[in-house]
Image (cartoon, grey):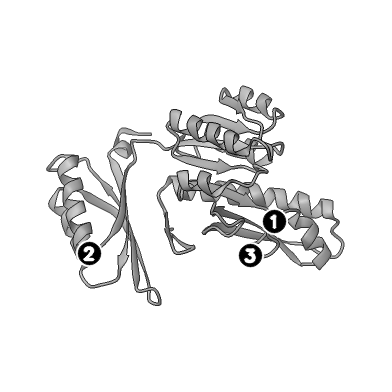
Amino acid sequence: MSPSEAERATLLVSCPDRRGIVAALAQVLYGHGANIFDSDQHTDPLAAQFFQRLHFDLTDLQTDRGTLERAIAEVAERFGMRYELRYRARKKRVALFVSRYDHCLYDLLLRHRGGELCCELPLIVSNHPDLARVAEQFGIEFQLIPVSAENKVQAEGAQLALLKERGIDLVVLARYMQILSASFIEGFPGKIINIHHSFLPAFVGGKPYHQAYQRGVKLIGGTAHYASAVLDEGPIIEQDVVRCSHRDSIDDLVRKGRDLEKVVLARAVRLHLEDRVLEYGNKTVVFD
């Protein structure tokens, strides 16, 4: 990260739609010496909700950051805003959860090594020992926490304690083949990204490629979404599809699907890391 990038910040805002929001936010940033690089906004007319992403530079800030934060908080209170102010200099700390499949894990690790994912990646957690060798190759801590029906509560407790101890901001389920409990998800609201190997809402649950084959579909897909208490029904971040035909076997669908899973998951993680996603209801606004 260059010195200039370290002086950047992003403000994500959502609130009931009304006049004056854009002007108020622009005015408070300008008044404190912040330089807006880009601004994107969206209004949902049915929900009467307003959303905005402001990316700005703090190099010539005329006050301190605390004063700016208090000014933003005052505007937020006036308009009934939910908002998050995130400084570029503080990289998010990401933990990868895996089981035995390695394609999404390798892809994320290579993208991180290549500088595509701006984050710290200190931890890999698994319920199987198979991928410890991958963590070792990349010099990342690997924690094995077996999960069974009998020890699920204790295992998730150990996982949550580990995440807190390591200061983790985002959990990525890179084909982690366990259903997380509602209490685990509540511990990281909007901070757990899952990849599901189908074009949701089609073929939820297990063996979606087998379900797709049985239906003879002509498209299969991948969906990255925030985890929710209801399986495979969390807010969708990113999706993509690939064509298939009657000639494709289940193995062909799995092969094609795994390529999609990697790309879709990486896109979703990057969008989250760049503070481009806002949740509302069971939907997302994803800014370009």
CA gap between label 3 and label 2 equals: 35 Å
Nearer to the camera, 49 or 117:
49
Quadrant containing the C terminus in the rendered view? bottom left
Task: Verify CB contact (< 8 Å) between mark 3 and mark 2.
Answer: no
> Image height check: is 159 above or below 215?
above
Residue 148: x %, y % from top left: 69, 37
Name the residue furthest bottom: 46
- Disc on the earlier residue, 3 or 2: 2
Q: Is residue 180 left or right of residue 209?
A: left
Q: Assess disc 1: are there few (<14), some (14-19) or many (≥20) residues with their C-alpha within 10 Å of its C-alpha.
A: few
x and y, in percent, of residue 37 in the image: 29, 52
In the displayed structure, does residue 11 sit left or right of residue 165?
A: left
* In the rendered image, the vertical position of residue 83 relative to residue 157, given as above or below: below
Picture layout, residue 63 above or below residue 135: below
Q: Are marks 2 and 1 in contact (CB under 8 Å)?
A: no
Helix, strand or loop status at disc 3: loop
Residue at position x 69%, y 49% in the image: 259
Residue at position x 56%, y 25% in the image: 140
User: Badge 3 is on which residue?
Assistant: 201
Residue identifier under label 2:
79
Which SS class for mark 2?
Answer: helix
Q: Which amino acid does label 1 sit on?
A: Gly
Q: Mark 1 points at which residue?
A: 205
Residue beneath the point at 53% across and 30% down: 123
Residue 227 appears in the rendering: yes
Ranked by sequence position, the earlier of labels 2 and 1 is: 2
